[in-house]
C-alpha cells in the first residue's frame, strides 16, 4: 500500500489528489470526485474539502493510500 507523508496537521482531499498526481489543478478535484468513487476510511466521500488526517486510508481507482505523519 503506498503511503503519503503528511507534513501538516491535515490535508484536504482535493490537495491530496493534486499532491499525488491524480489531478493537475485544484479545480479538477470536483470533477474527479463526481466521476470517481473515493473512499476515506471505507466511507464514500464527495467533498474536495474533506480533511484527511494521519492514519487514515484513502482509496480510489483500486489503489489505497495510507496517510502518515511525516515525523513517524
Image (cartoon, rainbow, N blue to C red):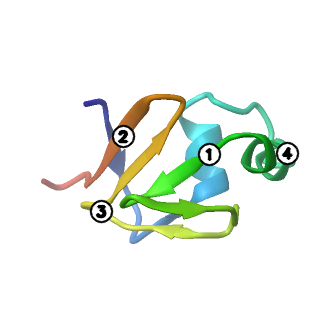
- Dot placed on the residue nearer the N-terminal end, 3 or 2: 3
Residue 57 image position (x, y, % from top left): 34, 52
**Foreground disc of the pair 3, 4:** 4
Q: CA distance from mark 1 to mark 4?
A: 11 Å
Q: Secondary structure at mark 4?
A: helix
Label 2 vs label 1, nearer the camera:
1
User: SS at mark 1?
Assistant: loop
Say whether disc 1 or disc 3 marks the residue closer to the N-terminus.
1
Q: How many marks?
A: 4
Disc with the residue nearer the chain's start (2 vs 1): 1
- Looking at the picture, tell me which residue is in the foreground, 31 or 5: 31
Identify which residue is drawn at 57% across, 49% down.
Answer: 38
Q: Which residue was labeled with disc 2?
A: 65
Q: Which of pointers 2 and 4 lies earlier in the amino acid sequence?
A: 4
Quarter of the N terminus within the rendering = top left
Q: Residue furthest left?
A: 72
Q: Picture coordinates of residue 67 (x, y %)? A: 32, 51
Front in this rendered view, residue 51 or 63: 63
- The label shown at residue 31 is 4
Along the horizontal axis of the image, is 69 left or right of 52?
Answer: left
- Identify the mark nearer the N-term, 1 or 4: 4
Splitting the image into 4 quarters, where does residue 18 fall? top right
Measure the C-alpha gap from mark 2 to mark 1. 14 Å
Work out whether residue 20 or residue 56 is closer to the camera in this orientation and state it.
Answer: 56
Return the mark for residue 54: 3
Frontmost of labels 1 and 4 is: 1
Circle 3 — which element? loop
From the viewer's perspective, is the residue at label 3 or at label 2 nearer?
2
Distance between the alpha carbons at the discs numbered 2 and 4: 20 Å
**Residue 37 numbered mark, or none:** 1
The reply to whether the C-beta atoms of the residues labelled 3 and 2 are less than 8 Å apart is no
Amino acid at each position: 500500500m503506498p503511503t503519503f507523508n503528511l507534513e501538516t496537521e491535515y490535508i484536504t482531499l482535493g490537495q491530496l489528489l493534486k499532491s499525488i498526481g491524480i489531478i493537475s489543478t485544484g479545480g479538477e478535484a470536483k470533477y474527479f470526485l463526481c466521476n470517481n468513487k473515493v473512499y476515506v476510511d471505507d466511507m464514500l466521500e464527495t467533498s474536495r474539502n474533506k480533511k484527511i488526517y494521519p492514519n487514515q486510508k484513502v482509496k480510489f481507482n483500486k489503489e489505497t493510500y495510507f496517510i502518515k505523519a511525516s515525523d513517524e
